[in-house]
Structures are given as C-alpha cells and as structure tokens.
Image (tube, coloured by chain):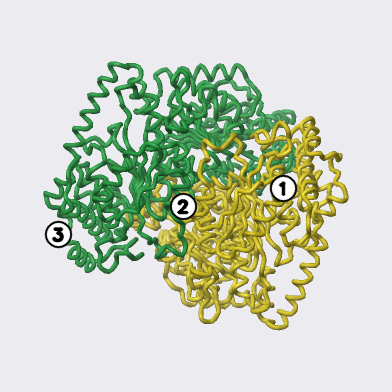
Chain colours: A yellow, B green
C-alpha cells in the first residue's frame, strides 16, 4: 500500500475537483458538486485501498467499485484517467458529448473501468450488493485451502438520494442477512439534495437504520480528511461479520467559496468566475486540463495493479494445476460461456419435451426445464421474491442459499455445494437490481421470480439490464386474468405489452412445454440480453407441432389449414389453444385459417423479412388474441385484436375468459367479420 | 368506549377466524392465515378504538383503516359485516366470486367501508401515510378554536411483506419527517412469509429501524392479547410527537392446530378436516356462516358510530354558522367538486395563453398553468421527488410544506396558510402511493413531479390510482432524448407508450402552452381518473391554431393543407413542430399533408367515431412521429412511424434528434415514400 502524505492526498483530491469543474464547465452541463465533495473519500479509497489494474479492467479478482450516485460521473472518469486507465484527457474533454467515452452518467462497456451503469438512484448500491454476493458465493464454490482465487472487496459510494430510495432499503437489508462482510459502502453525507437542505424531508438516523439491518456502521468521519477515511476503510476490512457502512460527512462542492454546501453546486456548471475563485481557494494554480506530473504519479495505479494481477495470475496458474476442472469451470463461467455441449443438450431436451406433450402450467414447464438446466449449468443462481412455491423457480439442484448464523459464511451441503436458490423476500425491485449486480460481476447467471404484475415494481432494473446488455432472466408467473380469484390487483393486463416496449429485453410468453423450454434455452444463450419469461398459473395443453426448429425464431406457423390460408390467427401463451380451437371452428364453416404462435415478438422481429413474410404472408388478413391490452398487436397489421383493455375481475379464471370474450367462438366470429364471411 | 371482557374479545376474534376459514374454504382460494393471526388485533382496534359509522361509510371525519397486507381481505370483510356495514352474510359467501362485493383483495368503491385497494404489498401503508397527511393538513387549514372539525386517526395493519418492500421505507421515513402523530400502524409480526420462516432473509430489527426514522415504537406486545393491544393503541393516541408503530407478535393461522405458525397457513384453504380441528381448538362450536347474536352485538358499531357522527354533524352545523365560507369550501373540496366558475376560468386562461403564443418548455408552460390553478384551487397540493426546480411544480401560491421542529405541527404563514408544495425527497414510488392516499382521503387534489423515466419507479402506484379511479396528477418532465446530456439512463424512450398501456390513465404529451394548459384543466376536471403530464425540458414553439375547442378531445386537426390532404402526419409534444415543418416542406413539393396533434390518445379514443374519422379520414395514409418507441402508433393505422426503438445517447439534444432521424426532412421523405411520390 502506498504511503500518502496529507499534502499528497489534498493535491490528488484537488486534481479530481479541477477536472470535474472544468469538464462540467466545458460541457455546460453536468454535476460538479458531488465529485468535489467526494474527492477526498476517493483519494483515500482509490489512493490506498482499491485493488485494481488499470491496464486490465477485466481482471477477474479486481475490487469492484460502484458509484451509486452516478451523476458524480466526473469523479469516476477523473479517477480512471488519473490512475491510468485508457481514458485520455481528450476523453475527459469530450464529457457528455456524442459517442464520447465519458457520457453524462457512467455506462458499463462504454468506459474502461466502469463496473455498472448508474444514475437512477438507489440501484447502484443494489448492484454492489449483487457483486459482493457473487464474490462471496464464487469464493465458497471455488476457493480451496491455500488458494483464495476469488478474494476481493466491493466498494460503493452512495449519497442521500440513494438512501432515500426504497430499493436501497431492500438491498441493504438483504446484504446484512447475507453477511456480506466484504461490501464496504461509503456514504457521502452532505445534507444537501436538489431541493436543498434535506433535514425537512430526510430526517432519519442513517447510522441507526443500518445498525437495525445488522451492518457495521463506522463514523461519521470527516469526509474531507482522507487519512480518517482511509483508516475507516482499513477498519472495515478487518471486520468479518457484516457489511460495512462508513458515514462520511462532506460538503457538496467542497472548495467552491460561494457554492459549497448549497444545492446550487449540484447540477450546473460553477461558471468561469467561481471556478477561478475555487482554484484560488483550493490553492490549485494549474490551468484547466493540466495535472502536474507528481499528482499523476501519486494517483497512478498501473505498477501496483500490474504487480497485484501478476501475483494473482501466478496463484491462478498453480490453482489450475491443482484443480484443473474447477479452474476450467471458473474460467468458462467468468467468460459467460455455456458448456460446449449445451446446444446439443438443448436440442435433445426439446425433443424429449415434445415427445412427452404434457398438459401443465407453463410455470411448471419452466420448473421442469430448470430441473435440467440447473443440473447442467452450475452457474444458474435462482431465486424468488417470496413466491418460490408459486413461481416454481427452485429445483432439486438448487438448495436454499443460507449463511451460518455465527460466522456468516456460506452454508454448504455435505458435498460442498452452496445453496443456489435465493429467498429474496418481498423485494422485487431489490431482487432485480441485485441480479444485475450478480450478472455484472460474472460467474453466475441470475434468475428470479415474482408475479408478472409486480414487474411494475422492478421495471427500471429490467430497463437497466437491457441498457447494460446483461444476461438476467426474470420468471414472471401468473401472467394474466388466468390467475383468477386474486383479482385485478394481481392480474396482469398491460404488462406483457409494456415489457415488450423496453428496448433490448426479450419477452417470452410461451404456450406450452416445448415453447417454455425454448424460451429458457434462448434466454440463456443470449449472452448480451436480459429476458423475461411470462408464465401461466393455469394448465396449458400441449400444442401439436410439425417442427420444433422455428420456435426459437419467436414466431412460427404452428398449424396450417388444409387449404390456402384466408386468415392468420396470431396468439401467445394461454391463448394459443383458443386460437387452435377457433381454427377448427372456422374449418367447419369452410374458412381456412393459419395459426401462428408468437412466443417472442423480439426474436421474431429479428428474423429476416423473407422469414417474417413466410409466417405472416402479405395480403392475408391477420387477427391476434392475447389476454391483455390490444394496442401493440396492430404493429403486425392486425385487422382485429381480441384482448382486454381494462382491468380484470376477481373470479375463477374460466369465467373471466368467458366474460371478456376470449373464446374460440369469439375469435372465429371476429375472423368471419374480418373476411366478410 | 365499549368495555369488553377477555371472553368477549376472544369470541369476537374467533368469529373473524371462523368467517375467514369458511370463506376461503368455500371459494377454494384465498388467505386464511393472516386474518386468523390478526383477529385479536382487529378486535382491539375495531372493538374499542375505531371511530366510524357503519351506516355512513363516507362520514368525512371517520377514522381511516387501511389493510396494507390486503391478502387478509377476509379480515376486513368480516369486520365490515360484523360491525354493521352493508355487507351481508351472502356477500361473504360470495368471496372471490364474479361481481361480488368481496373480491380477492379489498377494492375501494366495491365494498362499503373499504378505504383503499390493497394487495400489492407496501403500498397500503403509504396510502395510510397520505391519508394521515391529508387529515393533518385539512385540520390545520380548517379547524378553528373550539371547532376541531377534522380530527381523526388513521390506522393501518401491515405485515412482514410490507416491511420488506422498499416503498414502506420511503413512506415511513416521510411520515416521521411530517410528524404524523395520528397515524397508528399495527405491525403483524408473525415471522412467516410465503417462503417460510423469514429470519434468513428478513433479519432487520424493525423497532430500531422505525426508531431511526423517528417513530414512536410500542411493543412488541402479544398480538393475541386484545387487551394488551388495546392498551398499546390507547398509549399511541396519547403521544403527539410522531407516528406510532405497535409491534404485535402473532402466529399466522392462530387457532389452527396443524397450520398455525407455518407458511401453509398463508395462501390456501385449511381444508375441511383442519377447519373442524380449528373450531374445536378455538372452542368455536358454531356452524359455518353462523355468528351468535351476542357476538354480533359485541361487534356492532352502528349505535355508537351513529352517535359519534351525530355529534360531529352538530359540531359541523355550528362551524358552518361561524365560518360559512370555510365550511362551504371544505364541503366542496371533500366532495371533489371544482368551483362553479372553473370551466369559464379555464376557457379564459386558455384564450389568454393562446394570445401570448409563448415559446417555452412545456414544463415551464405547466408551471405557468399551475400559477393560475394553484391560486384558483386551494385544494391543489403539489410536490416533487427532489426535482422541484426541474419539474417546476411550485408556484407563488404553494410555499414549502413544513412542520414545526419542536411541536410537529404544520407551519403556517402570516396569513394562516399552510405550505402546499411537498418535498417528497428522492422517493418516486412513495410519493405516488402517498398521493393515492391523499386523493383517497379527500380534501386535496395531489400532484407531484419527477423525470418521466422514473415513472418506472412509481409505475404500480399509477396503476393503482387508475384501478381505484382517483384523481392524482403526475408531472413527468424531461420527457425524451430532448433532455440531452444526462444520457440514456435518464432519457425516456418507452415511457410515453408504456404509460398509455395502463387502463384508466390519461397520458398527456402537450406540444405547446395551450395544449399544456388544456392537459392540466382536463386532468383536474377528470374526477375519476389519474393523469400523467409528459413535459419537455427544452423550449417548444407555439403551434398556431385556428381553434382551441378541440384540444381537449385529445387529438385534433392542427393544420390543414391548402388542398385536400393526401397524408396525415400525427405528432405529439416536441415533435409537433417537426411535423409542421415537414408539412411545409411537402407543400413546397406539391404534397398536401394534414398535421394532427395528438396530445392525449386516451381522450381521442373516447371521442365518437364520427369525430375520429373527421380527424383521421379513412383512406388517407397516416404517419406518426414521436421521440420514443414506435410500436403503439400502428393502432392508428399508421403506414410509417418515425421514432426511436433503442436507447438514447448522452449528447446535446439537437444532435440527438438529428442522429435518430427525427427531423422534418426525414418525415417529409417518409411521407413521399408512403405516397410513392
């Protein structure tokens, strides 16, 4: 660990402040206050503690750093630049400009060293909880005596906004239940949010709140005394019983004579004159975009990081020699690759499922698929937001994840396996944001369940997964009025359509066991996409199919009429059997209707035009049926859509399908009307 | 207050247990465990403390009762039946059946005495916070020395699930900041959730957590000792400094020999045999659906409630005599009626706005509209989730709502007016759920702001407002890539469309000052609907218009070409000016295009077919442009939609509109392509 004098700390922090001021000024947009306030905290953490190699941002055992208050992006960009990442001064000058590596909020994969995309408050700390969980579980799975191959910390900075957001409550409560002792969160307590001094609306005692969760709480420390922050971090690293919160008292915009400690410092440039005054006040007499070499030297982490990674590489080589299979599995999983035989196994599983032709609920079909998948893929890490028995997300391969009450360590079974099914509690949003963190860390593919309607709660975390292009799988059961008596509060109506609107998210609503299996294998094979599986509570008959190959295309001709099709009936999920019955009714009256099953619109939309035209021939009238809002189906040129543009009712499911006209006879009648027949 | 012996308490509670068991058994669906566990708590509260009149569920000064753990609906239905509401034994027998008054989860307006619709966990307690706030503010506004016209408590039952949900954190933290001393929450602490014994995933210390917020915490008390619960409630009523949490230790399914204290008791019928055993164990030897008269008598609240309301009616009559204007205003506001002259004023304001023809951001136009509205409507209670200066939700008539630090009372200004703009903090979901509670209480019309993208966080509360048909107004600013440099985490892309999918929610995306004003007046005149106003960060030019009358219809012909229209260009919000420019470009090349402004699809869809056909004539090709996902526009038969089916970028807004082809020349070109011209 480097030794840094108070003067060095100050200069390092001031370099960050100067870059933040100057970049925001140049962009004429952005947030100078938070970077300036957290600069000393950053000097303590990044200057002394963070274990990372700027030359290889993807070193698997690096410490993770999450900036949960993502509007402080210039803090992170400054740190990455100063410590030696591939982020040049020109990149900093491009702050918030089109296609720069320094967008308004940190974005993973855009900037080397950025671990997660943050900005929507509260979710970054949840990502950090997920990363810390992944670290702890990987260590339990893969470390062996003398080989601590996975052994790193997860650090997060978070501010008042994150603390107010409910999702921070969910994830931080879980972090304590999970005893994530290597999670160290530094709370930037500056008492200011956009609306001003927070006391009138943010009066909770954070130390007591986190102690109530079971965290170690350190401080308040002076967040502008890097040495004090450094010691607090050192102390946190010695505590091995619980996650750690270091409360750092700071002033937003620290250094600015006229804006520090005010909401004005938050979200707008300081202005040229105030920047000049701030430079004077800080004793930072360097021109904009100019960092003295000694400050660069104090920050630079390439040498130390390179050494640390080299040591780890040696350790890992020895580990690979001692435990070749474990090492290979770990490398495969960290790379996010499925086993080589996965595609073949998937094909065999699909053929077997087809042969069985079971009539079961698609949530049960999902569990059956998972029974195979969780056996084949040890990286699958499941869970449910307190609906395990309803979501059917658990299998014989996924015992409950538990932590030893006295030591906090991961409980393993007699064969050394960890629990792989997480009871997230009634915390849908926290679950989803934690899953994002698990996926970001690597080593696991997270999936988790709740009722489809409660995807509302977790919605922005689904969006973030899609924006970040991370493979997480959401199991949303009880996907329509088909859940029956629980009534409109629980019956999804708009949710299938509204999830389909999220760019980059694959939404599967499978109709039977085969489609459910394909939904799962497609979701797992899509390395750069999250998927949502919308599954029925009620039993669904198996839909006979001539070929299985096209299911993965998202939409396919399920049933062709005896003569040339006069109409196409498009259906998803539980309504597919209704479409098939309507087809039969129409056939009786001499109308030839094709049935297209459309389990995944996004996959279908990715097919080439020739395929899409084969499935939905130009000029043949189309109708769609889905137990939900109708509007989005018209983009497939439907002449009529049978659905439900209102809320459901509390009643047995069968009565509801009748009540809302979601029946074969209605669909057949609508088809006749469209055809004028 | 009635005196009730331990034996009476027990019999009263057992009556609830029996009804809950029997109803769930008969429906073969539902949740017996929670009602059975909370029956004694209910006996204490409803038997001794609740001030209500079953003969008039809408008595304005009744105590409010919220069942936040709404799956315990049979508890509430039993209480309503037993205390004398218009809810018969036959209604109870219809539990969870189609069109019964006893749906699976409690629904306001469906069952007399049900104050709010609950089921989605965590939101009920937020509604209660909103109700308690409304009570406190109304009392501050309307009570006069000697006339405590508004003076009631708000009670809530909540369970472990509500405690885990993040939204409970948001609202309970605010309840303390607001010093809601007349809020008394009873926490059903039974240690069991659906996944089993909660300790491994729910290990926080609730008493410490709520103390950290600043609540009074009472207990744990024995939740099966009604007398102890009764005394705890009495104690809470004496405390006047903070909201109150009574922790009641209970057993889920209390009384069931084989299911009590297990997750099995939660969500399925006990079964005939176990019900028999439970009856024996409880000493309840009455047939199903049979309540002895003495138990009815002990529960019945009609006489006492009638007396209490009569006393209040006398008080109110005296108050009306002393303060006729105040009384009239209070009655008008509680009835949810706008002042008689509102429609005329709205018309005048619209004419003036039109005459001004300002080029300003629609968020600024909204603030200008609010400047008038908050002056004209004292019931408007605004707020923002820590983005006041960005959402522009405050006006000169809405000082900040503040509470005296020492007494906790509402701070009033020199003229006796309360603060009417709420700093909700960074708590979007909590804000929305609290707003629902305010609207449910009555006396205020709540509105609140955040960025449109963060409507994701509050989405289910918007849905609940729509399901409950309550007038709340959401101000969602920064409504597209037009916000620029903050980047894709903050740029709404799918949100306008996804909000339009929520049944019963009016979504306005106005294009200029006139449309913004109409959006506001329409939202306020829609007594039985929530509205969302989607507003720009950036300036929007005023769109010249021949007539103002049709704006409120949601879609109207804004600009007619010189000759018969060959194409219709549909646009909303910031894209309307692009459509007008495209129209001009097309005119130059001899193509006549009509521009239709569509600020509110829902309002347009409610127009009769003749009007809709006048605006969108059959046979004339249509194109739409909106800076968001395109899919939903095809329901208007659009041949082409210009939009953005991907995430945005961090860059100045103007560059983004160019980058994504949202320009007049692109729209003109697309029109030519559609026309084959």
Chain containing the residue with disc 3: B
- The residue under the point 27% across, 41% down is B112
Residue placed under numbered mark 1 in the picture: A40
Closer to the observer: label 2 or label 3? 2
x and y percent of residue B322 in the render? 29, 16
Q: Chain of mark 1?
A: A
How many residues crowd mark 2 within 10 Å: few (<14), some (14–19), many (20+)? many
- Which residue was labeled with disc 2? B165
Give B50 or A510, whichever is nearer the viewer.
B50
Q: Tell me the chain of label 2.
A: B
Between marks 1 and 3 in the image, the one whose residue lies nearer the viewer: 1
What's the residue at 76%, 31% (across, down)?
A274
Image-quadrant location for residue A604: bottom right
Identify the residue position indicated by label 3 in the image.
B287
Would residue B66 be found to the left or right of residue B631 on screen? left
Q: Quadrant of the C terminus of chain B?
A: top right
SS of the residue at dot 2? loop
Q: Secondary structure at mark 1?
A: helix
Spatial distance from mark 1 to mark 3, Cα to Cα? Answer: 72 Å
- The residue at 29%/54% (across/down) is B38
């Amino acid at each position: 660990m480097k030794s840094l004098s108070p003067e060095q700390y100050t200069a390092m922090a001031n370099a960050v402040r100067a870059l933040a001021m100057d970049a925001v000024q140049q962009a004429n947009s952005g947030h100078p206050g938070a970077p300036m306030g957290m600069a000393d905290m950053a000097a303590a953490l990044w200057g002394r503690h963070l274990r990372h190699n700027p030359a290889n941002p993807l070193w698997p055992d690096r410490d993770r750093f999450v900036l949960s208050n993502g509007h402080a992006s210039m803090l992170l960009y400054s740190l990455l630049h100063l410590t030696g990442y591939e982020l040049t001064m020109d990149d900093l000058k491009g702050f918030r400009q089109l296609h720069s590596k320094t967008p308004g909020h940190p974005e993973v994969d855009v900037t080397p060293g950025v671990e997660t995309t943050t900005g929507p408050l509260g979710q970054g700390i949840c990502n950090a909880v997920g990363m810390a969980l992944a670290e702890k579980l990987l260590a339990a799975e893969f470390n062996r005596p003398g080989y601590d191959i996975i052994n790193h910390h997860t650090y997060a900075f978070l501010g008042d906004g994150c603390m107010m957001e409910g999702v921070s409550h969910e994830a931080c409560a879980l972090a304590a239940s999970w005893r994530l002792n290597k999670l160290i969160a530094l709370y930037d307590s500056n008492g200011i949010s956009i609306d001003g001094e927070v006391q009138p609306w943010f009066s909770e005692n954070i130390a007591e709140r986190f102690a109530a969760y079971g965290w170690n709480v350190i401080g308040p420390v002076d967040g502008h005394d890097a040495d004090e922050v450094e010691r607090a971090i050192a102390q946190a690293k010695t505590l091995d019983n619980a996650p750690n919160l270091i409360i750092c008292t700071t002033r937003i915009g620290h250094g600015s004579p006229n804006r520090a400690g005010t909401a004005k410092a938050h979200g707008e440039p300081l202005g040229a004159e105030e920047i000049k005054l701030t430079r004077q006040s800080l004793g930072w007499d360097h021109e904009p975009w100019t960092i003295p070499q000694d400050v660069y030297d104090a920050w630079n982490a390439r040498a130390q990081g390179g050494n640390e990674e080299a040591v780890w590489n040696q350790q890992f080589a020895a580990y690979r020699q001692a435990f070749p299979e474990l090492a290979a599995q770990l490398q495969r999983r960290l790379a996010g690759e499925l086993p080589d035989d996965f595609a073949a196994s998937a094909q065999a599983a699909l053929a077997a499922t087809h042969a069985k032709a079971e009539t079961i609920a698609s949530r049960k079909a999902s569990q059956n698929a998972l029974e195979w998948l969780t056996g084949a893929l040890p990286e699958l890490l499941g869970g449910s937001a307190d609906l395990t028995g309803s979501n059917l997300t658990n299998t014989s391969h996924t015992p409950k994840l538990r932590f030893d009450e006295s030591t906090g360590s991961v409980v393993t079974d007699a064969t050394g396996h960890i629990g792989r099914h997480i009871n997230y509690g009634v915390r849908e949003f926290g679950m989803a944001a934690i899953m994002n963190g698990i996926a970001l860390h690597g080593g696991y593919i997270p999936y988790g369940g709740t009722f489809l309607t409660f995807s509302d709660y977790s919605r922005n975390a689904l969006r973030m997964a899609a924006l970040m292009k991370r493979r997480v799988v959401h199991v949303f059961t009880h996907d329509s009025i088909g859940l029956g008596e629980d009534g409109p509060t629980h019956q999804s109506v708009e949710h299938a359509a509204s999830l389909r609107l999220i760019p980059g998210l694959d939404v599967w609503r499978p109709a039977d066991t085969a489609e459910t299996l394909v939904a799962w294998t497609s979701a797992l094979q899509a390395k750069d996409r999250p998927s949502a599986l919308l599954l029925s509570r009620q039993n669904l008959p198996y839909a006979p199919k001539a070929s299985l190959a096209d299911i993965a295309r998202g939409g396919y001709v399920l049933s062709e009429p005896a003569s040339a099709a006069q109409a196409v009936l498009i259906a998803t999920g539980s309504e597919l059997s209704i479409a098939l019955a309507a087809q039969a009714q129409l056939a009786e009256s001499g109308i030839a209707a094709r049935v297209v099953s459309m389990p995944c619109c996004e996959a279908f939309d990715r097919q080439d035009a020739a395929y899409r035209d084969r499935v939905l021939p130009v000029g043949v009238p189309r109708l769609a049926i889905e137990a939900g809002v109708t509007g989005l189906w018209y983009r497939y040129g439907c002449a009529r859509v049978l659905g439900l543009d209102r809320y459901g009712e509390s009643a047995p499911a069968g009565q509801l399908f009748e009540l809302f006209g979601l029946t074969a006879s209605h669909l057949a009648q609508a088809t006749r009307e469209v055809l004028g027949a």
